[in-house]
């Protein structure tokens, strides 16, 4: 059996064989190997650096007294830094797993998106979690920034979670059972320290002493910075971090303190980083500098055929996140289509496929050559080209010389109605490979992601590194060269394939060659294999909710190149946990498909999807072990939460920051409660039930389980409230306060729940609009857009809220914020609400003219929706059309600003007297109601029509003209406040 100390030794040997130095762990507590100066400082600047070291990583908040089987306050990381990116770091990493005795051809090894950031250190990077049969064993990151400084060259960080790896390899269910060395367990070596340090961090650490230490360490860090000594300064920044973490574990950090300390540590880390770079520069960079990679030389341009052939272009990448893969497919389609359109090459349909490791564009029937073309080059105007005697001017001579022609080649042509001299140039069409090389290069350089990264390529940036290009037109290589990459006819296969690359004979055989080697290029084909395979595995005992799990299935589809569904099981005892806990673990943590019976009840089984051929039993067992560990964690937290009084959970909200300017989650919960009660009072909808639910709102955010799985907020509030003996209706209302969590989610069914939900979203919008602004474009990190959509949905779904004006609600929420909320911010919120409601109605298929006609009621979405429904029925009613046309006609004729009102005594014509009498008899309904308005105003139709036929409105007599316009203004204003009539079209 591979012991833990053997694993550490093997990994260290492997990486030293790859040119890494071995250094020692940091001599003060660090939360991760990243903080060791061998990483944090050495990734800065231009010097090369390769290092491997073991780092005990201390995280006081993970203290569990040694009782949790998977959670430790001190765990062991093995840290590797490769600077610069060697170009094949994933392959090197897989080699390290082989050094541990892990057969990567038998196991399911996956690179799953993980974007890392440390705001306190001003550091971030992009990369992956590495999964071994569903178990996260490594973090793999391309560092982009540290200490607020952009990194050039980029470093690759590989961080192994040693305990996790060894538990999986030794088939252990508790960290204490790990065989650390022959005959000695991990628990025997570290069990006592795990318990005692947990006691210290959670129970015995002196809060005031650690506060003093925090200030002392911060002061000493600054003193060392001022002394120009980055290494001791960094050491004291780390001590600051540990003292802060101890205080945090003791629950002694307020929201304001957290924001202040993060800001201070970020500032200190930034100063240390700058100082380190300056010091290394002053020492003349003792380790030298990294030489950038040279540009690639394109393949020789060779064309062997003269007929139209297929074009295939493959952009090979390291594993793209699913969302970025979907975006990249569309980008490639657009860029290639536009690029071909800008040439004179004839071509057929453009199709684009994608897997996590490749983007493939296929264009049918691409012509062998461009068509020849005569290009007209415009010169100076004729009057400037020739003198009065008809001789050429210097302007014409210069134009001819610049175009390489003689004066006899110059012609005259009207351009924009003005005579100009022109030259016509015959341009022979270029061969397809030459033309395509330019087009395809622009496709690569045009790719962009939501968050772009750099690697060892000096020019390219994308979501993940681009590592190879394959470009063929028929049998010929298209000579594409982009920065350090040159296209050829070789492509890469599955990572476990032997050999890992293959040569492509022609563009026409490319997709077939991939398929023969197991790679399914088309998303829909992969999806179908997953759905059919999963359904076959669970039949006849269970079923997969394909529609309900559509988003998860799409995500899984873009995580694999060759899908292999596998059926796993888990102990039925875990079914005692809430369904939402079980499915959240399966979906969000593991990307497993839950299995249900015919009645929708969860069964103790799941479907996972491996990538490529694997040892099915080995991978199944590994995934089952991972899920068991996850469920053990969840059960541990669930039991601990059930033993914790609600009041104690709620007190933990003081330690959770909402935002640095808007206070803690406790502050936010208090605002939500007060706002919900205030709105209820306005609607005369208050109740003891609502008051109790308001007291409990958000309390479950202080629970251990929701801290681990935030998507369970509300679900666990209901569960824990019922367990604590709260009234079922109170528990339901606290749950409903979190609804809807996304578009299409369930909505509150009770009035107390709806009021709390409304208050939650009003508070979030008012506070964030004032502090970070409303979302623009696709960026919406605080889900403000979703909050607006939730407001609209809850208002529409709750009849008792129909009369409540959401802009008034936003004003109430604004008044309770800890920051000023300007009137302009509230006006912007009202406009944002209007635009979101317009979008909602339009996406529901409502005609645009009717949608815009009801938008004056956007602050009351339920009213706007009701009016839309009435309009749908009314537009077919001739009476409504006549009323609408009468109102619109009056609006067109009456000048803007004309007041409604007139002297009836001035009216003499029978038609105007009839209209006066009809108007006087109308009683317009007080509330917005199209049907009632039509019924009330229908008697006006005939008098209005007669008035327009028989009465000359713009009489010469000013008094009479004013009376007639005032009468029409009354007609105009009858529908005021009901609809924006100007938008209606018939």
Image (cartoon, rainbow, N blue to C red):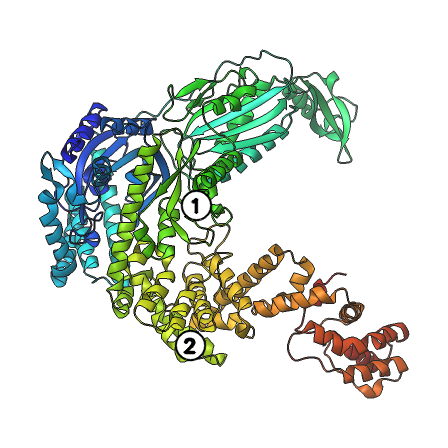
Res 22 → quadrant: top left
x then y, percent, for residue 540: 46, 43
Looking at the rendered image, the disc whose residue lies closer to the viewer, 2 or 1, is 1
x then y, percent, for residue 892: 77, 68
Spatial distance from mark 2 to mark 1, Cα to Cα?
A: 49 Å
Is the residue 279 above or below the residue 931 in the image?
A: above
Q: Left of 697 or right of it: where is 302?
A: right
User: In percent of the image, x 72 and y 78: which residue is there?
Assistant: 899
Report crowding for label 2: few under 14, some 14 to 19, many 20 or more residues within 10 A (C-alpha): many
- Residue position marked by numbered label 1 in the rendering: 541
Quadrant holding the N terminus: top left
- Residue position marked by numbered label 2 in the rendering: 677
Res 154 → quadrant: top left
Farthest top residue in view = 304
Q: Do the residues labelled 2 and 1 touch (CB within 8 Å)?
A: no
Query: In the structure shown, which secondary structural element does the residue marked by tag 1 occupy?
Result: loop
Is the residue 163 above or below the residue 406 in the image?
A: below
Is the residue 490 above or below the residue 381 in the image?
A: above
Query: In the structure shown, which secondary structural element does the residue marked by tag 2 occupy?
Result: helix
Can you see residue 460? Answer: yes
């Amino acid at each position: 059996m591979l012991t833990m100390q053997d694993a550490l030794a093997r990994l260290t040997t492997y990486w030293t064989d790859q040119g890494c130095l071995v250094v020692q762990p940091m001599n003060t507590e660090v939360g991760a190997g990243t903080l060791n100066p061998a990483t944090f400082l050495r990734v800065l600047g231009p010097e090369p650096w390769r290092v491997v070291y073991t780092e005990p990583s201390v995280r006081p908040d993970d203290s569990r007294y040694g009782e949790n089987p998977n959670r430790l306050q001190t765990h062991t990381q093995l840290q590797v830094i490769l600077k610069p990116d060697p170009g094949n770091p994933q392959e090197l990493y897989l080699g390290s797993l082989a050094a541990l005795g892990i057969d990567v051809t038998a196991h399911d090894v996956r690179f799953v998106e993980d974007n890392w950031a440390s705001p306190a250190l001003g550091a971030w990077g992009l990369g992956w979690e590495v999964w071994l049969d569903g178990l996260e064993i490594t973090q793999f990151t391309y560092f982009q920034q540290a200490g607020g400084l952009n990194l050039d060259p980029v470093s690759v960080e590989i961080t192994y979670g040693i305990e996790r790896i060894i538990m999986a390899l030794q088939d252990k269910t508790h960290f204490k059972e790990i065989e650390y060395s022959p005959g000695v367990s991990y628990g025997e070596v570290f069990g006592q320290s795990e318990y005692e340090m947990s006691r210290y961090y959670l129970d015995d650490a002196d809060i005031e002493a650690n506060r003093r230490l925090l200030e002392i360490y911060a002061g000493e860090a600054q003193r060392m910075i001022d002394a120009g000594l980055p290494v001791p300064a960094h050491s004291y920044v780390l001590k600051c971090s540990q003292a802060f973490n101890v205080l945090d574990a003791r629950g002694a950090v307020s929201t304001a303190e957290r924001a202040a300390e993060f800001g201070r540590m970020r500032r200190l880390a930034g100063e240390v980083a700058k100082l380190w770079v300056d010091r290394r520069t002053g020492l003349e960079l003792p380790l030298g500098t990294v030489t950038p990679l040279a540009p690639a030389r394109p393949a020789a341009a060779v064309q062997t055929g003269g007929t139209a052939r297929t074009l295939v272009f493959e952009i090979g990448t390291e594993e793209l996140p699913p969302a970025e893969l979907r975006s990249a497919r569309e980008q490639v389609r657009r860029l290639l289509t536009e690029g071909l359109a800008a040439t004179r090459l004839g071509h057929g349909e453009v199709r684009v496929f994608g897997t996590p490791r490749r983007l493939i564009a296929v264009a049918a029937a691409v012509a062998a050559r461009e068509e020849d073309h005569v290009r007209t080059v415009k010169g100076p105007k004729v009057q400037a080209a020739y003198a009065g005697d008809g001789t050429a001017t210097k302007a014409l001579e210069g134009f001819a010389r610049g175009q390489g022609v003689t004066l006899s080649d110059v012609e005259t042509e009207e351009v924009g109605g003005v005579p100009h001299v022109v030259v016509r140039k015959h341009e022979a069409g270029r061969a397809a490979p030459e033309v395509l090389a330019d087009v395809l290069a622009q496709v690569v350089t045009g790719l962009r992601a939501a968050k772009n990264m750099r690697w060892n390529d000096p020019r390219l940036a994308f979501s993940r590194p681009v590592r190879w290009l394959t470009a063929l037109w028929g049998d010929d290589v298209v000579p594409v060269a982009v920065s350090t990459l040159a296209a050829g006819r070789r492509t890469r296969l599955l990572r476990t394939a032997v050999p890992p690359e293959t040569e492509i004979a022609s563009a026409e055989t490319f997709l077939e060659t991939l398929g023969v080697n197991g790679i399914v290029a088309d998303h829909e084909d992969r999806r179908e294999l997953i759905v059919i395979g999963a359904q076959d595995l669970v039949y006849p005992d269970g079923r997969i909710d394909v529609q309900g799990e559509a988003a998860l299935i799409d995500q899984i589809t873009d995580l694999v190149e060759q899908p292999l569904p596998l059926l796993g099981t888990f102990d039925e005892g875990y079914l005692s946990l809430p369904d939402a806990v079980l499915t959240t673990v399966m979906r969000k943590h593991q990307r497993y498909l839950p299995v249900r019976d015919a009645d929708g009840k969860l069964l103790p089984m799941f479907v996972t999807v491996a990538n490529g051929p694997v040892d099915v039993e080995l991978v199944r067992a590994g995934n089952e072990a991972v899920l068991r560990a996850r469920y053990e964690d969840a059960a541990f937290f669930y039991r601990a939460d059930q033993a914790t009084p609600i009041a104690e959970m709620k007190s933990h909200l003081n330690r959770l920051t909402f935002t640095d300017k808007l206070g803690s989650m406790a502050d936010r919960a208090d605002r939500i409660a007060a706002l919900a009660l205030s709105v209820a009072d306005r609607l005369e909808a208050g109740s003891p039930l609502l008051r109790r639910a308001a007291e409990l709102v958000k309390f479950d955010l202080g629970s251990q389980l929701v801290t681990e799985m935030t998507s369970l907020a509300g679900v666990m509030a209901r569960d824990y409230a019922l367990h604590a003996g709260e009234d079922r209706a109170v528990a339901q209302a606290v749950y409903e306060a979190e609804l809807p969590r996304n578009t299409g989610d369930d909505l509150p069914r009770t009035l107390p729940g709806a009021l709390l939900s409304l208050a939650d979203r009003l508070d979030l919008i008012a506070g964030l609009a004032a502090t970070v602004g409303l979302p623009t474009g696709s960026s919406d990190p605080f889900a403000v857009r979703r909050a607006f959509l939730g407001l609209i949905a809850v208002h529409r779904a709750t009849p008792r809220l129909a009369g409540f004006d959401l802009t008034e609600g936003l004003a109430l929420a604004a008044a309770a914020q800890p920051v000023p909320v300007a009137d302009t911010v509230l006006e912007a919120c009202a406009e944002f609400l209007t635009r979101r409601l317009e979008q909602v109605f339009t996406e529901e298929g409502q005609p645009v003219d009717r949608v815009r006609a009801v938008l004056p009621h956007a602050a009351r979405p339920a009213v706007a929706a009701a009016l839309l429904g009435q309009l749908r029925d009314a537009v077919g009613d001739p009476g409504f059309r006549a009323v609408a046309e009468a109102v619109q006609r009056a609006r067109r004729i009456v000048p803007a600003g004309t007041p409604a009102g007139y002297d009836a005594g001035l009216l003499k014509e029978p038609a105007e007297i009839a209209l006066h009498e009809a108007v006087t008899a109308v009683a317009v309904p007080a509330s917005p109601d199209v049907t009632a308005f039509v019924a009330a105003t229908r008697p006006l139709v005939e008098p209005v029509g007669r008035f327009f036929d028989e009465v000359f409105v713009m009489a010469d007599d000013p008094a009479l003209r004013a009376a007639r316009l005032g009468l029409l203004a009354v007609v105009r204003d009858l529908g005021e406040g009901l609809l924006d009539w100007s938008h209606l079209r018939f």
